[in-house]
Each structure stands twice: as C-alpha cells, then as structure tokens.
Image (cartoon, grey):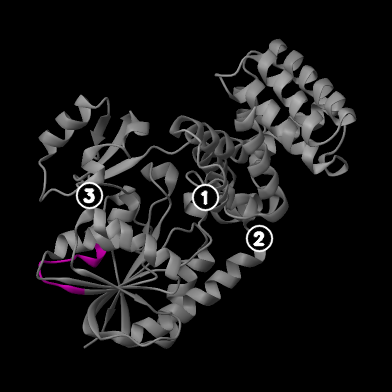
Amino acid sequence: MLIRKLIFSIIYLFDQNKEKIPNLFVKIFKKYPHLSKKDKQRIHACVNEIIRYRGLLDHLIEEGSMRKIRYLNPKIVNLLRLGIYELVFDDIIPDFAAIHSNVELAKKNINKKSSLMVNAVLRNIQRLNKKNENLKISLIQEKIDLAYPKWLLKKWEDEFGEDATKNLCAELLNEKNMYIRLDIKRLSIDNLISLLSQNSIEVIQHSHFKYFFKVVSGQKYILDNELFKEGIISIQDPASGAVVELIDPQKNDSILDVCAAPGTKSLFMAQKVGHGGKIFACDNNQNRIEKALNDNLRHKKNNIKWHLLDASKDKYPFHEKILIDAPCSGTGVIGRRPDIKWRLRKSDIQRMADLQKSILENTSNYLKPGGKLVYSTCSLEREENQDVVNDFLRYRSDFELLGTNSLLPGTWVDSKGFMFSFPTKTNTDGLFAAVLRKKV
C-alpha cells in the first residue's frame, strides 16, 4: 500500500505544482530512505508511465465517470489515473488488486464517499477493458492527440505537418531505449559486449556512431554494473554524441563548454582531448555542477575544470572551440522525460529563445578568429533553433554557418545544413545543432 500511496503523492504534487518529476523523486526517496531498490524502480516506472499516458487516462476517467475532469476533485482524478493505469496499461497488477487497493487509498487519503466513486469508475473501466481486449492499443492509435497539450500539438502540426506530427507523437509516447557510450581507450568493443552479456545485458552497436550501443535488454542492471561504476561506460544518447562530433575535439585541444552541467558532453570531449587537453566547463547552477563533479569522479577525468558562470553575461578566456549546450524547452526529449509536455507553457518557448539569443551573443565574443562554435539544444522548436542562429547571423557578419552534411548521416541534417535529429527519422532524442565559424 505504501508504494501506491507514494506514486499517488508524486503524481498529485506534480499535478498541483508542475515541479520536475526527477526533483519529486529525490524528495520522496529522501523522506523514505528505507525503500528498496525494487520499490524505487516500481515507483519510478509507474509515475513516468502515468505522466506519459496522462491525457489518455483522463479520457478514460471521463468515460467511466460521465463527468469532465475539471469538475472532479484533483485527488480523486489522480487516484483514478493510478487505478486506470494499473487496469489498462500495466500488465503486472491483477484487476482485483488495482481496484481494491485504490479504493482503500481513497478511503484513507480522501474520504469514504470518494472511495465509492473510485470503485464505480474503476469497475466501469474494467468492464470496458474486458469488452475491448486491445483497449490500450486502440486508444494510442485513435486518441494519441490526447496525450499532448493542444497548443503543442497544433504548433507541431503547423511546423511539421499532420502526418509527421502524428508519427512524432507515437514515437515520443514510447519509452525510449537507453544508449550507452564506451570509453574505447579503456575497453575494446568485443570485451564490452562479452562483459555485459555475462551480466544479462544485451546491446546493439549503433550503425554510425561506433562507440554508442542501444541496450535491448537488461537496462535495469546498468547502474550497478562495474563498467558503469568505473566510468568505462556512460549513459548517453547518440544525438548527444553527435553534437560532440561537430565540435571535433582533437588531442590536446582546449574547449570552452558553457551551460555544460551535468556534463555528459563534457566527459565525452574530455575523453577525446586526452590528458594534454582541457575542458573549461561552466554552468550557472551550483547543484548541477555538484552532480557533474560527482560524475567526474566516477570517470576519473582530471582535465575538466568546472566554473560557476552565467553564459548570458559573464566573461570567459578566449578559445578556438566553444560548445553552447543551451538551456531549452526540452521538447526533443519528451520521450525520455514525459513530464516536460505537461509543465511546458506556450510562452516558455519565446522566453527560452530570448535567453538563448543572449547566451549566443555573449559567448561568441570569446571565440578566436578562425575558431568554431557549436550551438545546440534538445528542442524541436524553430524559435529556439534555426531562428536563434539566423537572428545571430543577421547582425554578426563576422560569423558564417558551416554545413554538417559531411559529418553526419543524411537523415540527421536538414536542408539548411543544420543538424536536426528528428526522433522518427533517427530513432534518438530530438536535438538541434549549428556549427558557426568566426571569420579571420
């Protein structure tokens, strides 16, 4: 019962405050330190899946209650989201347990009257689910638009077209595969595959980015694997790795990396530049820097130096290579972070674009003539990507755009030469990157 109560608490708090789900996990797990690893995994999985399918669950709540969501008590709504998720989307929990446990949860956390309603709605959905053995599949196929905010759906349809948007929504609704990156200087590919296999982890090598591997089974064992603990493998999406390839780190390079925490790209660049190179990594958030420093210890890299600096206004040493991993709306990683779509507001897109412009404007001043700057986001939105770069180039005639066509697979590059890993085309996170050169 405690696990269900905690799941209910997290999704209710998220519904009320729109706080980032990872932050809520940290708070709950800190409050209940006795939770087992298995319990934490169950809570993590259920919460993310309920948030992922929230719009579809709300549709079923309205079907089962014959009422609009806005007229229902928010606590009842979130208990029903949990109960209906277990009835329709979860293959683990038997129907009787899903109904009984959530009715009891309603009694103890709301009131007896609420528990009667929860019982009635869940039994209605149980009957509906038995009539339609493929209810989950039919919902996803026929009602997938409900799994996204209307404003975001319309925005994507205007930008990408209806068919591409429908495919995108289906892709982002699936739980994303985990990818790992190998530090090839510390272990061979053959030994990696063999050692992981011995620990019930199966991986497939990426067709283009040779040191990236999709985890096809055994994902739950990765964090406890010795290769991960020793920093020999890292969790990183190939699209993130592609951005690093664009900066083209060479042995002994010194690279400025701004908005860098928690440092996944920083570590990859540190691996490439070697002991003689240096990554001057910066972020304006001390907590994120602390996470990066902890990860740095795991990887045993001593060529990354972290600094608390604001990329929109602070000064930096001049560099020949600069990576801007700009803060953004995060719409390209909704498949991995489903809470983003419900936290994001339409006004956030332009707010982020304004911040990104100020970061690019300031940081570009510290690029040496002839040097290369890569501007990157994990957003699918034009306002944060192409528009930011084009606006910059309009008034900075001392910079020019370099195409990425020769550096990446064709499906990763748009017609203007920007990197754009559209999830349905690349089977990765959605990332954008532009390579800019400062004229001599």
Asked if residue 211 is positioned above or below residue 289 in the image, the reply reads above
User: Which label lies toward us, 3 or 2?
Assistant: 3
Asked whether residue 18 is drawn in magenta, I would say no
User: Which label lies toward us, 1 or 2?
Assistant: 1
Q: Position of residue 51 (x, y in %)?
A: 61, 41
Horizontal arrangement in the rendering, residue 23 relative to residue 310 (left or right): right
Query: In front: 147, or 43?
Result: 43
Residue of label 1: 26
Q: CA distance from mark 3 to mark 2?
A: 37 Å
Q: Which residue is found at the position 68% from the left and 39% from the top?
A: 55
Q: Amino acid at mark 2?
A: Arg
Is the residue marked by circle 3 packed among few (<14), some (14-19), or many (20+) residues within 10 Å?
many
Residue sitting at the far front = 34
Residue of label 3: 231
Horizontal arrangement in the rendering, residue 108 relative to residue 291 (left or right): right
Q: Magenta residues, as a range?
A: 245-254
Q: Position of residue 247 (x, y in %)?
A: 24, 67
Marks 3 & 2, CB-CB < 8 Å contact: no
Q: CA distance from mark 1 to mark 3?
A: 23 Å
Q: Secondary structure at mark 1?
A: helix
Residue of label 2: 345
